[in-house]
Amino acid sequence: MSSVNILDQKELIVQSWKRCHNFGLSSTGPINDLLLTGKELKEVIKENEYMIKKTTSILEKLYPTIHSSGLVTVIVDRNGTIIHKVGKWDIEESLDYMSIGSNWSEKIKGTNAIGLAIYEKKPIITHAEHHFYVKNHFLTCAASPIYSPTGEFIGAINISARKELYHPFTISLVSIVAEAVQNRLLLEHKNHEKLLALKEIELTANLYTSPLLTLDHEKRIIRANQTARHFLGDDCIGKEFQANQGYSINVISDGSNKAFRSVVSLHKTSKKNSQGINLYTTSDIIGSCEKIVRVRKIVNKAASSDYPLIIYGESGTGKELIAQSLHTAGPRKMKPFIALNCSAIPESLIESELFGYERGAFTGANREGAPGKFEAADGGTILLDEIGDMPLRAQSTLLRVLQEKTVTRIGGDKIRPIDMRVIASTNKNLHEEVQEGRFREDLYYRLKGIFITLPPLRNRTDIIELAEHLITKLDNPSVRLSEEAKQKLIAYHWPGNIRELNSILIQASFFAEGNEIKGEDIQFVDEYERQKNRKDSEVKTPLSLNNAEKDAIIKALHSVEWNISKAANILKISRNTLYLKIKKYNLKR
């Protein structure tokens, strides 16, 4: 801790006065006041509880001196708020001075020992006229900063009295107290570190072949074994650990819960709900593409509500991932998540599938009866997957359940109330389906609430980021993509979206020699399909001129998300001509 001689101290006070004038303070005007009370004050005291405890244990030895000498000792946090006070003034008009919760930073109280110690991070004494405000000239004060074991400024200790009680050794006293507090904090920190190290060794003893990391309280990597370094790179020490998956994390503490450390195994854990089923969370929505960032933002906002929600997206874009993430991020996460494939329900089983049935309800029924999907989802979330493919008869049955929020099992008469969040997903445009008479309008408006549209993989800008994430979930997570492989993935049109990407990466990692996936390891068509396509191409007749033109227009429109100006520019035709072609071929978005 640096000391301040008399000349330096005078210069510091002059500079402080200049700052006070710049703040717009008036030395003869009313003194500003910033007082924390109630919940805010309790939170600040709680946050600094450890420093208060260590400081007061030292001040206890000074209590008799403080009480008999008219001294007032206060502890302040890093912002200058008084969080503890010992002693009292021997003049009645000063009873309210330095009350707990008041702020004594330089901007609030002008030049004073606390404010200067916080600003300069040095021990300092301010006597009588040194104080900026005339009303504080009756004081003599000395303050010294307090630092954490890691060198972080955390607060200050201050001793004040009437100016008649001035003593030059007061600054030495506060410096000694501050140093004693720091020594105690450092000693206890070392004891915590020793205990944490022993627990860390005990925890990792049986896992030395797994990729293991140790993180500090700010999630920085402070240790990594050789397996983890191979996975993350040799320069990973000191970097912040970014966990996009539910890695196995064990938090160890020193027993007093004052010091923590995290030991991370890069082998991922399963995330199961109350039914023992693995569910996705929002951390599984991977990607930095602007469209995915927007999806993630909507999911985080919509998860806490019970509004009905429709997820649009092509097959393989991750609609169920989004539905499960909405469930696990919301208040119903500990309740069931039930997915119902609406396109796969035979018409003869619609009612039993949705409502359930009682014992002996029909021939071939389970002897004990069975609950339906809605009853099973009670309290939780039901996903109506591929709702656009649901038969009209089933739509009528579904609408009744959503309106009445009750079910009655087939063969029974007991009405069972149900409470659940409804999420629908489809790869069809439901509004168009309504217009074509294939989807009930009343059901559409019952389901319509929040919309989430998932972009097809070909329209995403983060394909490589997503691919590298999917690789970490394979049996060989250390394998990496070569530049040639990356370019090949970017150039592909991905008709099967993320599902196809994952499949191709599984095959590529299998074929890869060593830890690198090369360009030739990326195979978009298997041998059977290649032979079939070759034979088909031999007998395939050329496209007609109209079909070729239609195909070119469709590809151009899709590539720019139906931006007419951009599509016309790609096709080298005018906007009016493009509109006529769209009408000619009856193209719809």
Image: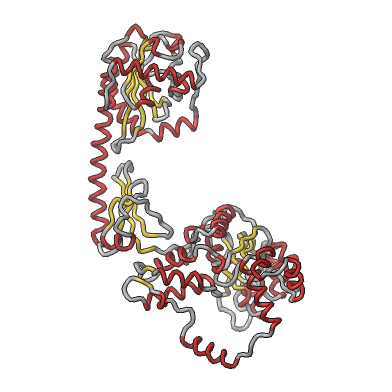
Q: The C terminus is located in which quarter?
A: bottom right
Q: Return the x and y of residue 576 as percentages of the image width and height.
A: 76, 67
Q: Quadrant of the N terminus?
A: top left
- Residue 414 makes an appearance in the image: no
Q: Quadrant of residue 401?
A: bottom right
Q: Residue furthest top?
A: 164
| Model colouring | secondary structure
- For image coordinates 51% across by 73% down, the residue present is 492
Q: Compared to 368, does 472 lie above or below? A: above
Comparing 435 with 375, the one in front is 435
Asked whether 546 or 19 is in front, the reply is: 546
Residue situated furthest front in the rendering: 572
Give x and y (percent) for residue 66. 31, 15
Nearest the viewer among 342 and 332 is 342
Q: How many marks?
A: 0
On the rendered structure, is 192 left or right of 266?
left
Q: Position of residue 110 (x, y in %)?
A: 45, 19
Q: Quadrant of residue 165?
A: top left
Tell me what residue is drawn at x 34 percent, y 11 percent.
70
Answer with left or right where residue 69 lies relative to residue 367: left
Q: Position of residue 429 (x, y in %)?
A: 68, 69
Residue 227 appears anywhere in the view: yes
The quadrant holding residue 477 is bottom left
421 or 250: nearer the viewer: 250
Q: Residue at x 41, y 14 (%)?
A: 131
